Amino acid sequence: MNVARSRMLLFSWLLPFSALAEPAQPTHEFTLGNGLKVLVREDHRAPVVTAQLWFRVGSSDEPPGKSGLSHALEHMLFKGSSKTCTGEATAILDNLGANHNAFTDQDVTTYHQTLQPHQLGVAFELMADMMSTATLRAEDFIPERAVIQEERRLRTDDNPDEIAHERLTRIAYPASSSGAPVIGWMHDIQRLTADDLRHWYQTRYAPGNATLVLVGDVTLETIKPLAERYFGVVPAKPFIAPTTSLELAEPGERTITLHQAIAAPRLIMSFNVPSLVTAENRRSVHALRLLNILLGDSPSARLPKRLQLTDRLFSSATSHYNALYRGDSLLTLTAQLNPHRTESLDQAQARIWALLEELKTTPPAPAELERARTQLIARQVYDRDAIESQASLLGTFESVGLPWQLTEQDTHELNQVTPADIQHAAITYLTRQRLSSAHVHVEKPHE
């Protein structure tokens, strides 16, 4: 972190929330005749623009036996279309100096480029062609499938942390498809075919199942004719609408035990919780977001401050919660035991439970809640410095089924959360009936 940014962070603690919450940039929306929704946010601070094409399809949509299908299709869209041959779209964007890539997640598949505004026509033409005329040849998929398998080996199979989280996520979603890994299980990847990809492409990649997001040095007047010219000619077609994956409210306590080549034992605890889409009221989700900050998603949070820095029980302790899923979500606590301590994982988990029970019996002090609230709001304000982050937030909201306008209400709604709301969230959601745990032990050497 540079000095100027450090000073900004220090100064932010002195600012009222109204000062932290910068006014939203002008944002426009329109829908093409084929159903493609377009969002345009003006940000004229630099002569660049990011263009992101979001499809409402991801790993949570995949049927059993076809995990990794959305991710494999993302790879294959760069293997040629009616206007480009294999790798040509990438080469064109590289020659423009564009920063470009794609990603697949639980609910979305997204293609994005950041480039100069006058180059948008090229990016639009490439994206529109890829979304409508991808060739998806079997002879291209066979070697690409091997690339995806190697990607899984490097990122997951050879990474003890990823393996543990993957196994835990699977048992944490017993009633929905949200537990499958985005990249897919290895045995499913090996069985995917070009026919599988073509069917997925034909039934999911439709203009009506996508959102185009533009953020940067552009205006509605410049974007609308470009979108009509390049995307408006893509024919409308029927598609399979995404569904919301609801989980059991209280599936019962579940535990998985693993032995891995790690330096010290690890503990992961995931609680079944709603998302902003599935919650009965948004206030409960905002309480969960702040509860996550209070527990472990900041250096001053209770888990790292008490059980890592003070007691030295853990060498690391964090928490994570993503409220922006189409289906239900998880609040996850992750901790690694200090290798110099002799406590068992069961004893370590009991210490965490004691900390959680405190939140159930005693609401956080107003000052502690205000500190967490300021941290969360400040993060979001600084994220607005990047046009890619702004576009990602807009695209995520629209793709999971939430209106983008909610992003402009976020600070106000976070300010409404009280200590009693935090306590109620802890009582409601941090229960054994919602808990999945992974106990990861140090693998003993073979004798």
Image (cartoon, rainbow, N blue to C red):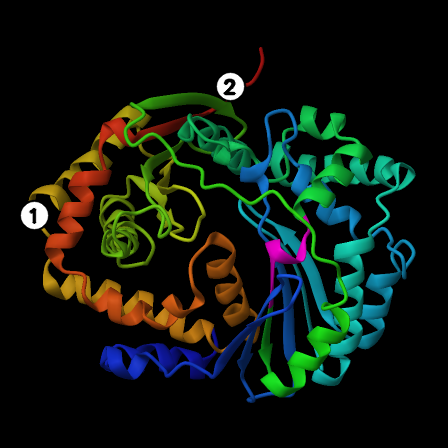
Res 162 label: none
Q: Residue at x 63, y 63 (%)?
A: 36
Q: Position of residue 414 (x, y in %)?
A: 25, 65
Q: Position of residue 10 (x, y in %)?
A: 31, 78
Q: Which range is magenta?
A: 205-212
State the separation of the CA atoms marked 2 and 1: 42 Å
Q: Are marks 2 and 1 in contact (CB under 8 Å)?
A: no
From the image, tell me which residue sits under label 1: 362
Q: Is residue 428 above or below residue 235?
A: above
Q: Specify the quadrant of the image occupied by residue 8.
A: bottom left
Label 1's element?
loop
Label 2's element?
loop
Q: Is residue 275 above or below residue 348?
A: below
From the image, tell me which residue sits under label 2: 444
**Does the image show residue 364?**
no
Q: Residue at x 29, y 23 (%)?
A: 252
Q: Say whether residue 101 is left or right of residue 263.
A: right
Residue 101 drawn in magenta: no
The amino acid sitting under disc 1 is Thr
**Does the image show residue 152?**
yes
The amino acid sitting under disc 2 is Lys
Q: Specify the quadrant of the image occupied by residue 311.
A: top left
Total numbered labels placed on residues in the image: 2
Q: Residue at x 38, y 33 (%)?
A: 247
